[in-house]
Amino acid sequence: MNVVAIILARGGSKGVPKKNIIDFCGKPLIAWTIDNCIKGGTNSVWVSSDSDEILEISAEYGANKIKRPDDIAGDFATSESAWLHAINFIELAEGKIDWVVAPQVTSPLREASDISKGITFAKENIYDSFFSCSVAEDLFFWQKNEDGNLDSVNYDWRNRKRRQDIPKQFIENGSFYIFKPQVLRNTNNRFGNNIGIVEMEFWKMFEIDSFDDLKMCSALMNEFIIK
């Protein structure tokens, strides 16, 4: 079975300049994701980027390069369009892909074992797509309704239950997705009709979108993974 990792890493970043290659705990941020995919059991790792600098750094850490066209590298381009371009590029070069592992560079708090677990689930051939998730314990969400009043989303505040009686809920944490190429081609969506989950520890859900996130994730990385 050919399991390929496709990592999307655009050059532009407004919140944190050069975010995908910024130093994170001693090496470029993207290097952690490449390493996870290599050690997690993918057959090959590919980085799709409009930035030559990102591609060159990625190659130094063992990834193959895909230069992404400008028309699917802008602020309004979808991840699906970039994945589809990459899949077509890889299959022309190396043949059929059975599964795509699509990790997010800005979610560095994952381990190779998380990727490996997802690939194991994929090989069982029960589902056609997966998302990584964290269990939402004691997280109660609220939103404003049409009248501007607050109302609870994932529980009924009028009938508040004990924590032990609340059904298990999952947060799609964005760390990585796994899907069959035909799912993407048929639906232009990373999810098919039969979706599975790969559970991760709660602290692995945090991602880097600001300098404060960078400091927090660095602390978690040093405490839980590097240590």
Image (cartoon, rainbow, N blue to C red):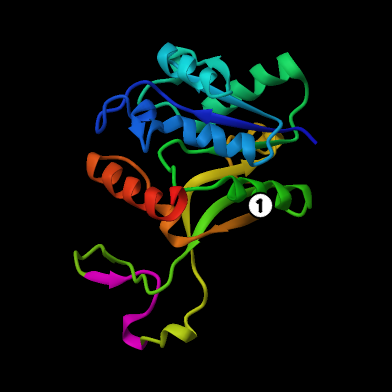
Residue at horizontal 20 percent and vertical 69 percent from the top: 149
Range shown magenta: 150-159
Residue at horizontal 72 percent and vertical 14 percent from the top: 93
**Residue 158: within the magenta?**
yes
Residue 157, how many percent across, how many down?
A: 32, 81
Q: Residue furthest left?
A: 148
Considering depth in this image, is 38 or 146 the residue closer to the camera? 38
**Residue 191: within the magenta?**
no
Q: Is residue 127 left or right of residue 22?
A: right
Q: Residues within 10 Å of mark 1 (few under 14, many from 20)?
A: some
User: Residue flagged by tag 1: what amino acid is it?
Assistant: Lys
Residue 110, how many percent across, how many down?
A: 50, 48
Residue 223, how many percent across, how many down?
A: 38, 54
Residue at horizontal 64 percent and vertical 42 percent from the top: 40
Q: Residue furthest front?
A: 227
Splitting the image into 4 quarters, where does residue 96 fall? Answer: top right
Splitting the image into 4 quarters, where does residue 46 fall? Answer: top right
